[in-house]
Amino acid sequence: MASIRILTGSVYGGALMTARKIKEELEPEGHQVTVLEAPTLKDITSTDDAILVCTSTTGQGELPPNLLPFYTDLKDQLPQQPGRPFGIIVLGDSSYGDTYCGAGDLMEEALYETSARKVGETLKIDALETLEPETKALEWIREWIDKI
Ligand SMILES: Cc1cc2nc3c(=O)[nH]c(=O)nc-3n(C[C@H](O)[C@H](O)[C@H](O)COP(=O)(O)O)c2cc1C
């Protein structure tokens, strides 16, 4: 059974709801899932749970305000997490062009700098195509959970 910390970043609630659905899906199977709505660095340095980022993209390829302090501290301090598994689910809108799903790229780059180990491909969920991000996320999580 896996222990997972989900770092959420959300402006309008879509990414947060997606994270909560993942928790609802996995916990009955015996996995332990913590959804963090205002994550701090200590939330990850105090455990060795697998990390799942579930964030939307705002501004011009930026992180939502509730995830930004975590990101800034992570970049400043770069606590080393060699081999620690992480995955990324990012919500965006392809009509934003170059900044499409940019928040996922920012988190990926920062986590790589801590020597964490990415598991699976980033799941990008396009608001132009998908009205229910949780449906895609629940499909993706089945594969991810088997790989961590
Ligand atoms: C003001 C604003 C800026 C946005 N900027 C981007 C962006 O740069 N890139 C992108 O891919 N999506 C962008 N989006 C789309 C959101 O990421 C997308 O609608 C997402 O599903 C919102 O998720 P949330 O409900 O968790 O906030 C933007 C949306 C808004 C309203």
Image (cartoon, helix red, strand yellow):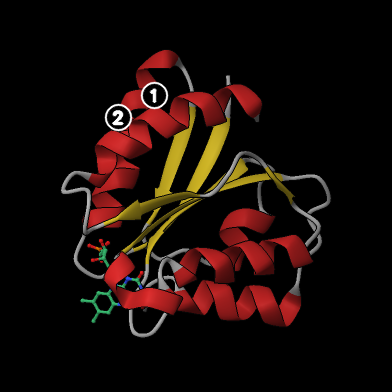
Cα–Cα gap, marks 2 and 1: 6 Å
Q: Residues within 10 Å of mark 2 (few under 14, many from 20)?
A: few
The quadrant where residue 25 appears: top left
Residue type, mark 1 in image:
Glu
Quadrant housing the C terminus: top right
Which residue was labeled with disc 1? 27
**Circles 2 and 1: CB atoms closer than 8 Å:** yes
Which residue was labeled with disc 2? 24
Quadrant housing the N terminus: top right
Question: From the viewer's perspective, is residue 70 above or below residue 144?
Answer: below
- Residue that lies at the very extreme toward the left in this rendered image: 131
The quadrant where residue 108 appears: bottom right
Residue shown at 27%/40% (left/top)?
134
Report the front residue among 126 and 8: 126
Report the front residue among 100 and 26: 100
| Label total for image | 2
What secondary structure is marked by label 1? helix
Q: Which mark is residue 47?
A: none
